[in-house]
């Protein structure tokens, strides 16, 4: 068993570990306002990592403004707070609760070996938190639940424990059971009785926090009486998870089960991910060193949660895709580490938060960086060598140097100039690539333009660096609309992206309306004559061509057919006519959108032996197409998307009604398991530019969707007329 180099009480110093067995990686999950960050700070205070409640800092004085700014940053990004407890380094990964920053949450899940689900006793459990629980359940990640906001006037801890069992227990609600019951002090003037202690259901000991610290005592008679039923349920749940099949019969037969056996069985069941204890926690009162329930929580984490050694071997391949054996968590094994987060510091530069899965990472070591396959989001696929800079352990806004990072641990690496979030670091003589993690598709567009000429010069580099930090963001240079588009997960994600561009990279941009790629096509067959004749002395210009245009089925593009007979248009100028027609088609005819799905047939023309030229026939071809358009109805075509919306069964009706109101056509539904339905629809893209935000409202945050381009189809005449009116006024279509 390894040990941490700094134990509890070493305030302001970050702990390190010399062996995977002395590491616990824990991610905190919960909705915004559940109390995750406050809980992390309470645990840091209890572990002696900080000296003042509510401050994760380096021991120096921090202004209130700096503290507020730091907490705001932590609310939108993954942050690591390492603490030491009982010879173990505990890496607490605090994740954002808002849905726009689910990428940071998934990074935390990737880096952790167990999860603490933080639930507010007054606010309940939202649908998004339940979905994350199911994700953890699918991969067998050990989980525990922590009920916070014990001080809330409308808090009902017994009711919340029952809600947790219903929400998280699934087919086995007995696997979600409280370990403690709250003890209450005298009621205040408002009638609310504060929680002053916890009664341990297994040990039947009282953990009394009423005097500002944690003290243990024997329970009183009335306290013992109130726990009898809850204790029996807990013991039966623990025994059900025991490997000793005789234990249940012995217990039901009246035999007293040894407390050590029960505790050992509970810890093993938690580590296996089959038993999920419910705990309670609250921050320390003014002047107190320990928050209520924080000691119990740290003991569960260090004794019940698995070490990195218990994680399944990590599947890897060579960078070229060739199979390689999976790697286990071994400090002496081949180096395999992953960049789980990338950020920028104005003084240090790029900082990469890295989880080491195998081997040992050392400063000044040369490693191989393998890419992650997100080229469609503006990222690069890497296959390069880089030199590791300084290694450090984050602590608040400070970085504390460390000399090495063993398998299973996390640390920050400075100045990895090429590595991006999701990249794999491995030995340069044995390059490996980890399987990439699933990231949600960004589906909310944000079109931007540089605020000034100075910003324009820095825009490309700033956007590239922003995309390198955040794999949930996609950078697009739209070839049809010529817009620079940042695809984000929501409005808050957009706001953070713009703020980071401004503050980190010194680039000021202006949001502009996002344009939809419309098309034009002919509504009926039409003919046109292009005549380009100019004589101004000297060499003139002469070209005449006659064409016929007819509509084609969707997806046909533009066909050009030559039916000239008798050499009316010389053979060398026929490609010139086609070039002019295609150039005019790309510029549009009625509303300025590209022309598609037509056949243009060149029927006749005239040429001059001296004055005809390539340029003249290009111009004549364009004029002929414009004349044909003037003689025919030009239809606007709008892009139609195939939409797949996954929602709980309770929201299928509202979602389908909402789609119908957006001119959507539902083409089918299918059951997707776990009480969810997949709704498939076809819908104009102009109607879903903000669907990432609007679906969240309709489904109360429980819906997800994907979209893909299907085709262009005619826009209804009434809507097409509104488009033309907006264009005449100079307003872009969004």
Image (cartoon, rainbow, N blue to C red):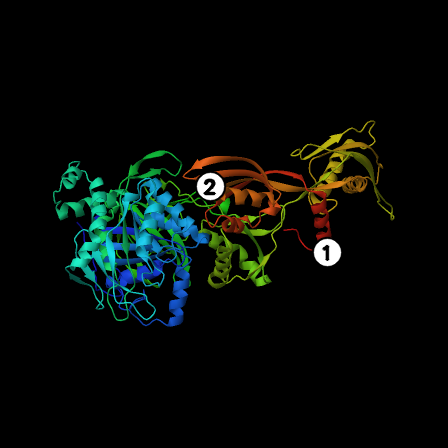
Q: Residue 415: x percent and y percent?
A: 38, 56
Farthest residue toward the top?
566
Indicate left or right for 239 with 280 as reference: left
Indicate left or right for 149 with 304 as reference: right
Is the C-beta separation of discs 1 and 2 under 8 Å? no
Q: What separation in Å lies between label 1 and label 2 (alpha carbons)?
A: 44 Å
Q: Is 624 or 22 nearer to us in this picture?
A: 22
Residue at 73%, 47% (x, y): give it.
Answer: 721
Q: Residue 427: x percent and y percent?
A: 31, 44
Give the number of the mark in front: 1 or 2. 2
Q: Residue 611: x percent and y percent?
A: 83, 41
Disc 1 element: loop
Q: Residue 38: x percent and y percent?
A: 33, 62
Q: Is residue 364 visible?
A: no
Q: Is residue 586 visible?
A: yes
Q: Is 602 or 698 nearer to us in this picture?
A: 698
Residue at 36%, 46% (x, y): give it.
Answer: 167
Q: Residues within 10 Å of mark 2 (few under 14, many from 20)?
A: some
Q: Is 202 or 354 nearer to us in this picture?
A: 202
Indicate left or right for 455 with 265 as reference: right
Instruction: Please tell me whether residue 553 is drawn above or below residue 24 in the rendered image.
Output: above
Residue at 18%, 55% (x, y): give it.
Answer: 224
Disc 2 element: helix
Instruction: Please tell me whether residue 120 is drawn above or below residue 373 in the rendered image.
Output: below
The residue singled out by tag 2 in the image is 649
Instruction: Please tell me whether residue 607 is drawn above or below residue 120 in the rendered image.
Output: above
Indicate left or right for 613 with 95 as reference: right
Residue at 47%, 60% (x, y): give it.
Answer: 500
Kindly identify which numbered label has been placed on residue 729: 1
Earlier sequence position, callout 1 versus callout 2: 2
């Amino acid at each position: 068993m390894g040990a941490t180099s700094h134990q509890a009480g070493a305030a302001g110093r970050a702990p390190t570990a010399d062996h995977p067995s002395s590491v616990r990686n824990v991610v905190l999950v919960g909705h915004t306002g559940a109390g995750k960050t406050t809980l992390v700070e309470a645990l840091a205070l209890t572990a002696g990592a900080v000296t003042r409640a509510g401050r994760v800092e380096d021991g120096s004085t921090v202004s209130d403004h700096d503290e507020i700014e730091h907490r705001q940053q932590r609310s939108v990004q993954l942050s690591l707070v390492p603490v030491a407890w009982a010879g173990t380094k505990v890496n607490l990964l605090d994740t954002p609760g808002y849905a726009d920053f689910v990428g940071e949450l998934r990074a935390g899940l990737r880096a952790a070996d167990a999860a603490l689900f933080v639930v507010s006793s007054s606010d309940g459990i939202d649908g998004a938190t339940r979905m994350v629980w199911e994700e953890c359940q699918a991969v067998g990640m050990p989980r525990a639940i922590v009920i916070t906001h014990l001080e809330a006037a409308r808090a009902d801890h017994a009711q919340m424990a029952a809600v947790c069992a219903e929400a998280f227990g699934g087919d086995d609600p007995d696997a979600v059971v409280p370990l403690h019951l709250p003890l209450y002090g005298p009621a205040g003037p408002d009638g609310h009785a504060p929680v002053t202690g916890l009664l341990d259901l297994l040990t039947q000991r009282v953990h009394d926090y009423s005097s500002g610290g944690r003290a243990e005592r024997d329970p009183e008679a009335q306290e013992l009486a109130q726990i009898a039923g809850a204790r029996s349920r807990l013991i039966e749940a623990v025994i059900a998870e025991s490997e000793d099949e005789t234990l249940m019969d012995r217990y039901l037969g009246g035999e007293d089960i040894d407390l050590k056996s029960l505790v050992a069985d509970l810890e093993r069941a938690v580590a296996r991910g089959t038993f999920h204890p419910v705990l309670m926690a609250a921050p320390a009162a003014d002047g107190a060193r320990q928050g209520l329930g924080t000691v119990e929580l740290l003991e569960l984490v260090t004794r019940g949660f698995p070490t990195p050694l218990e994680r399944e071997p990590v599947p890897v391949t060579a960078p070229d895709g060739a199979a390689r054996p999976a790697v286990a968590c071994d400090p002496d094994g081949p180096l395999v580490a992953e960049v789980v987060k990338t950020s920028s510091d104005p003084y240090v530069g790029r900082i990469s938060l890295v989880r080491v899965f195998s081997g040992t990472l050392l400063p000044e070591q040369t490693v191989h960086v393998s890419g992650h396959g997100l080229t469609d989001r503006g990222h690069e696929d890497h296959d390069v060598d880089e030199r590791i800079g300084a290694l450090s352990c984050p602590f608040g806004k400070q970085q504390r140097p460390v000399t090495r990072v063993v398998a299973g641990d996390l640390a920050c690496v400075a100045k990895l100039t090429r590595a991006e979030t999701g990249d794999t670091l491995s030995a340069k003589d044995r390059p490996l690539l980890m399987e990439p993690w699933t990231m949600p598709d960004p589906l909310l567009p944000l079109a931007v333009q540089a605020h000034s000429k100075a910003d324009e010069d820095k825009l490309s580099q700033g956007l590239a660096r922003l995309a390198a930090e955040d794999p949930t963001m996609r950078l697009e240079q739209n070839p049809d609309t010529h817009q620079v588009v940042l695809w984000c997960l929501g409005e808050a994600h957009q706001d953070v992206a713009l703020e980071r561009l401004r503050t980190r990279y010194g680039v000021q941009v202006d949001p502009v309306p996002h344009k939809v790629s419309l098309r034009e096509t002919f509504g009926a067959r039409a003919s046109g004559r292009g005549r380009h004749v100019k004589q101004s002395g000297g060499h003139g210009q002469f070209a005449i061509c006659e064409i016929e245009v007819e509509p084609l089925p969707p997806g046909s593009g533009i066909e050009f057919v030559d039916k000239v007979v008798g050499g009316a248009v010389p053979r060398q100028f026929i490609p010139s006519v086609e070039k002019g027609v295609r150039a005019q088609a790309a510029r549009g005819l009625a509303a300025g959108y590209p022309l598609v799905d037509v056949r243009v047939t060149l029927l006749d023309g005239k040429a001059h032996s001296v004055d005809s030229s390539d340029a003249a026939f290009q111009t004549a071809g364009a004029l002929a197409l414009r004349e044909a358009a003037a003689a025919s109805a030009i239809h606007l075509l709008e892009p139609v998307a195939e939409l797949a919306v996954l929602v709980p069964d309770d929201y299928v009706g509202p979602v389908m009604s909402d789609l119908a109101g957006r001119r959507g056509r539902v083409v089918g539904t299918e059951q997707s398991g776990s009480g969810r339905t997949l709704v498939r629809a076809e819908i104009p893209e102009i109607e879903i530019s903000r669907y990432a935000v609007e679906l969240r409202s309709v489904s109360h945050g429980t819906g997800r969707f994907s979209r893909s381009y299907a085709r262009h189809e005619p826009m209804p005449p009434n809507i097409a007329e509104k488009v033309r009116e907006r264009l005449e006024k100079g307003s872009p279509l969004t």
